[in-house]
Image (cartoon, grey):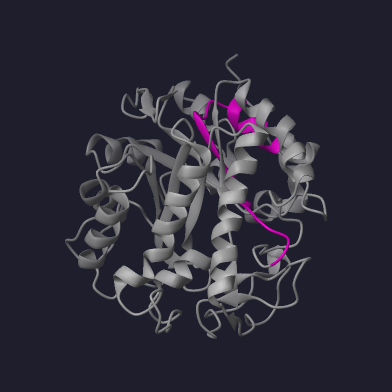
Amino acid sequence: MSYNSLFSDFTIAGSKLKNRFVVAPMTRVSAEEDGCANDRMKQYYERYAKGGFSMVISEGIYLDESYSQGYYNQPGLAAKKHAESWKPVVDAVQQHGSIFIAQLMHAGAQGQGNAYADETIAPSEIAPKGEQLEFYGGSGPFPVPRQMTEQDITDAKQAFVNGAVAAKNAGFDGVEIHGANGYLLDQFLTEYLNTREDHYGGSLENRLRLFLEIIQDIRTAVGDDFIVGIRVSQIKVSDAEHKWSKGETDAEYIFSTLGKTSLDYIHTTDGDATESSFGKGTKTLANAAKTYGKLPVIANGKLGDPEKANTFMEKEEADLVSLGTSALANPDFPNRVKLNVKLNSFDFENILLPKAFVKDHELHQDINME
C-alpha cells in the first residue's frame, strides 16, 4: 500500500513536515544524574530522524531545581548546563530534516524521583491512585503531596516559561506543554485530585486556568516564531481508566478554550486513538480536539499498524500520528513502511527498559534513506 495520507506533507506554524509521522514523548531516564543530556541520548533521538520521522518530541523534561523532576536520570532544562548539553542532541536530529520539540513537564504529585526535593507538591493533599512504576525506579504507593500555595503556583508557571526559553536557546524548534497523563497540569484539571476552593479549583473554568496562564506566559516569552503545543489526555500513568466527568461536554469546553489561545497544535493520547473516548458512539479524543479546538492535532494510541493509522488519517480524525512502542521497536518506522519492509514487534524486556539501549541498538538493521 502507498499510505498516501501518512506520507503527505503538512505544515505546523510555518514548519513543513515531510510526512505525518511523529515520535511520541517517552520516559527513558537515560540522562546523567545531574539532568544533563548525553551521547547515549543523542544516538537514541538521532535514530528516529534518520529513520524518517518528520517530528520528534522529547521525553518529558523537568524545569527547575525544586519540585518539577519526576524521575531519577530524567533530563532537565533547569540550568544553563542542561541547555548546553541538549545542543548536540538537537543538532543531530535537525541535520536529518526532522523537527525537534522539547516536552516541558512538571511531575507534581506523580513524581517518584527528585534530586532536589524530598516532597512532592500538587493542587491538593491527595495522592495519585495506583503505585509508582518499578521499571522507572519507583516502588510502592505515591506519597501524599503538599498542597501548593499561591507562591508555589507562581513558581511553577515561571518554571514552564524558563524551560521554554531554555529550549529555544538550546535550538529546539518548539515546546510541548505536558498537560496529560496525570502530571501537574492534569492534576489541576482532574476533579478528584483538585479540591481547591480558590480560583484554581472547583469549576472546569478554574481547573483549566493554569493551562491558559502558562500558554500565554510561554508565548510572550518565546515569541511567535517558535512552535508551542500541548498534550492532553483523560488517562493517567496512575489511573488508566480515568474519564472526564461530563464526557464530551467537558471535551468541547476544554478543546474550544485551548483553541482560542496561541497554541500551534494539540497532542491527544488515549488507550486506542481510534475508539470512542466518551462512551459508545461518541467522538475519539483526537477528533474532539480537532472539531472543537480547530487546531492541528497529533493523535497517539495504538496507531502502529500503518493501515489503521492511514485510515484514521483519511477520515480526518487527526493531522499527524505519534508512535511510542512502535517507534521504540522500529526507529526507522516511516522508512520501513515506505519500502514495505516488515516491522519489528515490540519486546518489553529488550526495548522498553532504558538500560537496555545498547542491546536495543543491536537488535535492528536500521533502514536509512539518506
For the point 75% across and 77% down, the residue is: 118
Going by the image, does 130 lie left or right of 250?
right
- Res 279 quadrant in image: bottom left
Q: In this view, does 315 lie to the left or right of 134?
A: left
Above or below — where is 105 with respect to 319? Answer: below
Q: Taking 337 as reference, is 90 left or right? A: right
Q: Which of 140 and 229 is in front in this view?
A: 229
Quadrant that contains the N terminus: top left
Residue drawn 65% across the image and 35% down it: 169
> Can the viewer see residue 158 in this picture?
yes
Q: In this view, does 369 lie above or below 82?
A: above
Residue 101 image position (x, y, % from top left): 55, 38
User: Of residues 272 and 235, which is closer to you in this image?
Assistant: 235
- Is there any visible trace of residue 270 in the rendered image? no
* Residue 64, picture quadrant: bottom right
- Which span of residues is magenta-colored? 44-66
Is 97 located above or below residue 103 in the figure?
above
- Report the residue at 49% width, 47% height from top: 218
Q: Where is residue 60 in the image (x, y as percent from the top left)?
A: 60, 53
Name the outermost residue toward the top: 370
**Front residue of 135 and 242:** 242
Say whether residue 55 is magenta: yes
Work out which quarter of the rendered image holds the C terminus and state it.
top right
Q: Is residue 137 magenta?
A: no
Instruction: Please indicate whether residue 201 sits to the left or right of residue 112 in the image.
Output: left
